[in-house]
Image (cartoon, coloured by chain):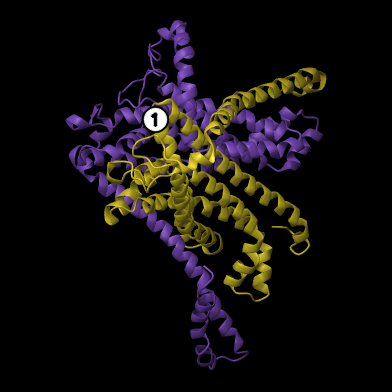
């Protein structure tokens, strides 16, 4: 792109821009077509099988409990993951950003970043080895622990990002007013970062709720069979999809619709908190001039 | 977290109260000063609590690594590194080699990344440079939501929609075309193949890498973009010479994260790849990956060695994901240095 060409031939430059726009739009369409197709199929095939009966009745698949208990199992596993993972995640994020200049802080940061890329099935295998072999049959606990290992670094990363976005002047001002470090963090820094942390946690929740692989090797791995109490929605979808019979296929799509809806609701909630925070921010802005 | 608040706060503060008078007796000047100094030196209860939680996370990772190492020890004792280059996987006769799965993982991830990166770069450019403001946030929401769709749903779609489609349309077409004469693509019957798995993986990776690349592009200060436009650049020229020129680091990082996701993805792979422990470069053949073989055989292991081999593959995945993270950091560091010098 030499300078004279830029001046004398604007037509070609605009043409090039148009070509790039067309290319980029094509990329968007190439991605959106199959993805949209997937969502439409899930909705179209899933809605047929979804009714109150669907949750109350057992399934046709031998050895499996009904979708109602799968839903309860999912809630329990995700609940265990939340109880274990959220305090550890928020705590680690707080420690790394606020007090993490030492060795532990640096190690914890690297561990969080690397853990976020850990294949989830590996967490499941380790949970199986550590929990199932020592306590015997507590399959839901092992599944919850595996999910907590996946949830904690994600929560920690959003907490770090949120706290880093809080301007340093706030901390310095709090310190200058004589507040201790605990009070500064709890009363000044966390309130400013809270919406961001909640948003990230909701999105992380969405990912954990659909997580299948670690549950496949923990919840389903009791005695090599499919135990009744240890059913969850994602593993149910997998079990129904991989056993070939038409009616089970329909139930798998219904289960997928439940999962996709849950993820959508969580994302929408995260988005609404995020945008409400955007509206709150100007009010905050005159208290904290640089925002937060 | 809230109940221990007043209790622990007292515990930390109380020992400091009696000591200052003794300490400050030798000092001249205001006796308050030593108290403040001591109090800031002593770690607050919050620092201790969050430190313990961070320590718990680090400990958990150490436990995971230790568990995987101990669980896979029989394999390393028996075969050592030869496990990685073993070509045969046959649990019934007690032969365990990881090479077919390593190859399958590499092929599907490379395929997925090669397909996903250009497409997500295009989407990110569109979002940053050419999208009208009111459309921007719904599109960002859509991309984020799609990145959150569970992988088992992608697998379901792969089984019932994509694989039959591949079987009935694409495979006959490819075999009939000149491509069919290449060694890379042979004749095959089933729609469950490395290619199908690679396509589903690409589809799953696109929203993630697109979101990450968009963030990298958006991190370049908006004023520079406006400055370039004011100088008479077209939007594409501004994107290319101002934004892309500075965002390469972020794009590389996004590629590394996308590769990590493709390598570690389990459900979509195990449901579409065909799960055959064959060493093949033929994209239309069924194959398997590290994650897929763990998912399909972990529950039905036939011997202790079988279990240990699967755990060894878990250890490989663990090591690769940490190494990939390290490599990502090095790339980012190196590029930063290169940009500065």
* Residue position for label 1: A242
Q: Residue A96 or B202: which is nearer the viewer? A: B202
Chain shaded purple: B
Chain shaded yellow: A
Residue A54 place in picture, x, y as percent: 49, 39
Q: Residue A262 or B109: which is nearer the viewer? A: A262
Q: Residue shown at 75%/30% (left/top)?
A: B235
Vertical placement of residue B320 versus A87, above or below: above
Q: What kind of element bears circle 1?
A: helix
Vertical placement of residue B276 versus B301, above or below: above
Q: Residue B153 or A273: which is nearer the viewer? A: B153
Vertical placement of residue A84 versus A46, above or below: below
Looking at the image, how many numbered discs can be counted on the residues? Answer: 1
**From this viewpoint, is residue B213 visible?**
no
Residue A292 place in picture, x, y as percent: 69, 57
Residue B332 place in picture, x, y as percent: 53, 42
Horizontal side of A287 relative to B299 (left or right) equals right
**From this viewpoint, is residue B45 visible?**
yes
Local crowd at mark 1 within 10 Å, few (<14), some, or many (≥20)? Answer: some
Identify the image quadrant of residue B213: top right
Horizontal side of B88 relative to B290 (left or right) equals left
Q: Residue A76 or A33: which is nearer the viewer? A: A76
Residue B35 place in picture, x, y as percent: 56, 84
Q: Residue shown at 45%/5% (left/top)?
A: B176
């Amino acid at each position: 792109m030499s300078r004279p060409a830029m001046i004398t031939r604007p037509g070609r430059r605009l043409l090039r821009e148009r070509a790039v726009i067309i290319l980029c739009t094509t990329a968007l369409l190439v991605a959106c077509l199959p993805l949209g197709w997937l969502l439409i199929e899930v909705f179209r095939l899933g809605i047929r099988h979804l009714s109150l009966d669907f949750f109350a009745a057992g399934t046709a698949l031998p050895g499996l409990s009904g979708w109602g208990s799968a839903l309860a199992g999912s809630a329990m596993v995700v609940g265990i993951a939340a109880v274990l993972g959220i305090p550890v995640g928020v705590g680690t994020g707080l420690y790394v950003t606020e007090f993490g200049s030492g060795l532990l802080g640096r190690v914890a940061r690297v561990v969080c970043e690397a853990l976020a890329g850990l294949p989830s099935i590996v967490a499941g295998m380790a949970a199986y080895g550590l929990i199932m072999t020592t306590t015997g049959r507590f399959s839901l606990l092992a599944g919850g622990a595996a999910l907590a290992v996946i949830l904690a670094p994600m929560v920690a990363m959003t907490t770090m990002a949120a706290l880093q976005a809080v301007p340093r002047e706030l901390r310095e001002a709090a310190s200058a007013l004589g507040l201790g470090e605990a009070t500064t963090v709890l009363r000044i820094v966390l309130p400013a970062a809270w919406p961001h942390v909640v948003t990230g946690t909701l999105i992380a929740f969405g990912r954990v709720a659909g997580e299948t692989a670690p549950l496949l090797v923990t919840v389903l791995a009791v005695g090599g069979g499919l135990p009744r109490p240890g059913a969850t929605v994602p593993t149910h979808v997998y079990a129904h999809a991989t056993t070939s019979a038409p009616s089970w296929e329909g139930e798998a799509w219904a289960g997928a619709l439940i999962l996709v809806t849950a993820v959508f609701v969580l994302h929408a909630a995260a988005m609404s908190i995020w945008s409400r925070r955007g509206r709150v921010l100007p009010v905050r802005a005159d208290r904290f001039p640089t925002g937060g | 977290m809230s109940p221990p608040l007043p209790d622990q706060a007292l515990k930390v503060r109380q020992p400091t109260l009696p000591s200052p008078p003794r300490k400050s007796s030798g000092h001249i000047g205001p006796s308050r000063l030593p108290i403040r100094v001591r109090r800031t030196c002593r770690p607050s209860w919050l620092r201790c609590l969050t430190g313990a939680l961070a320590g718990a996370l680090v400990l958990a990772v150490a436990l995971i690594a230790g568990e995987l190492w101990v669980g896979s020890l029989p394999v390393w004792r028996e075969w050592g590194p030869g496990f990685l280059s073993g070509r045969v996987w046959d649990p019934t006769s007690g032969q365990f080699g990881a090479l077919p799965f390593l190859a399958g993982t590499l092929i599907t991830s490379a395929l997925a990344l090669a397909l996903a990166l250009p497409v997500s770069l295009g989407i990110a450019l569109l979002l940053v440079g050419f999208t009208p403001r009111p459309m921007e946030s719904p599109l960002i929401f859509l991309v984020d939501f799609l990145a959150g769709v569970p992988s088992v749903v992608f697998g379901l779609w792969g089984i019932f929609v994509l694989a039959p489609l591949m079987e009935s349309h694409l495979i006959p077409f490819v075999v009939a075309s000149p491509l069919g004469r290449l060694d890379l693509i042979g004749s095959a019957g089933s729609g469950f193949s490395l290619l199908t798995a690679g396509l589903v993986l690409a589809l799953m990776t696109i929203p993630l890498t697109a979101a990450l690349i968009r963030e990298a592009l958006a991190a370049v200060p908006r004023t520079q973009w406006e400055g370039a436009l004011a100088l008479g650049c077209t939007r594409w020229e501004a994107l290319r010479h101002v934004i892309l020129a500075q965002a390469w680091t972020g794009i590389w990082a996004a590629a590394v994260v996308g590769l990590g996701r493709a390598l570690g993805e389990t459900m979509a792979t195990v449901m579409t790849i065909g799960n055959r422990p064959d060493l093949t470069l033929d994209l239309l053949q069924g194959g398997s990956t590290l994650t897929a073989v763990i998912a399909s055989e972990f529950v039905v292991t036939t011997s202790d060695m079988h279990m240990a081999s699967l755990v060894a593959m878990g250890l490989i995945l663990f090591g690769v994901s940490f190494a990939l993270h390290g490599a990502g950091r090095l790339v980012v560091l190196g590029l930063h240095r290169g940009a500065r010098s």
